[in-house]
Amino acid sequence: MREIAPAEETQAGGGRRRPKKTALMYAVDLLARQEQSSAKLREKLRRKGYEEEETEAAIARLIEKHYLNDADACARQFAFLYEESRSSVRQITRKLLQRGFPSDLVKSCIPEDTYEREKEAAHRVLALKFKPSADPRKMMASLYQKGFESSVCRAAVEDYAQADD
């Protein structure tokens, strides 16, 4: 009977599987599916059981080959969420922090003046959830819970309620 090499895994039925992927191969597979921050990629590799040394070598190689760039990825993801979503800047920031991007990098993506964009996003949120004749306090509370600044909440609710007139 042939002995199985340590790099090979066996299936429950005794059949053979392909050799276990290296950390670099697994990282490339993850990046092919979705853009990742280096911190989140590192976390996923460690959770999968790769040693720290192999994980760090894989991340260094991906950075060297320009497959992994936190600054570019953060800027792209921020721009997409900022332009295409109803989320407040605060929600977008929180989401990118959860994805493993450093706080200073996320903050550098925020434009100087976000008031008009925030007001438009808040208006879209209201249109999906409320009729213009709804209780303004409920509309304000809903927007505030979604991370919009109080001045944006007030202006969006006033504009939305006037659309009913």
Image (cartoon, helix red, strand yellow):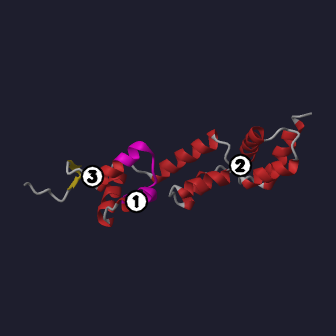
Left or right for 100, reference 141: left
Main secondary structure of the magenta stretch: helix
Q: Earlier in the sequence, mark 2 or mark 1?
A: 1
Please tell me whether residue 43 belongs to the stretch shown in magenta.
Answer: yes
Which residue extends farthest right?
165
Left or right for 73, reference 93: left
Q: Which residue is mark 3?
A: 21
Residue closer to the observer: 163 or 49: 49
Q: Earlier in the sequence, mark 1 or mark 3?
A: 3
**Disc 2 secondary structure class:** loop
> Which label sits on residue 42?
1
**Disc 3 secondary structure class:** loop
Crowd class of label 2 (few under 14; some 14 to 19; many from 20; radius 10 Å): few
Residue at 76% from the left image edge and 44% from the top image edge: 119
Which residue extends farthest left?
1
> Which label sits on residue 113?
2
From which residue to which does the magenta span run?
29-45
Left or right for 77, reference 16: right
**Disc 1 secondary structure class:** helix
Report, in whole angstroms, how far the alpha carbon at label 2 lies from the one at label 1: 34 Å
- Using the rendered view, name the quadrant where residue 56 is placed: bottom left
Residue closer to the observer: 57 or 142: 142
Percent of width and height locating residue 78: 57, 47
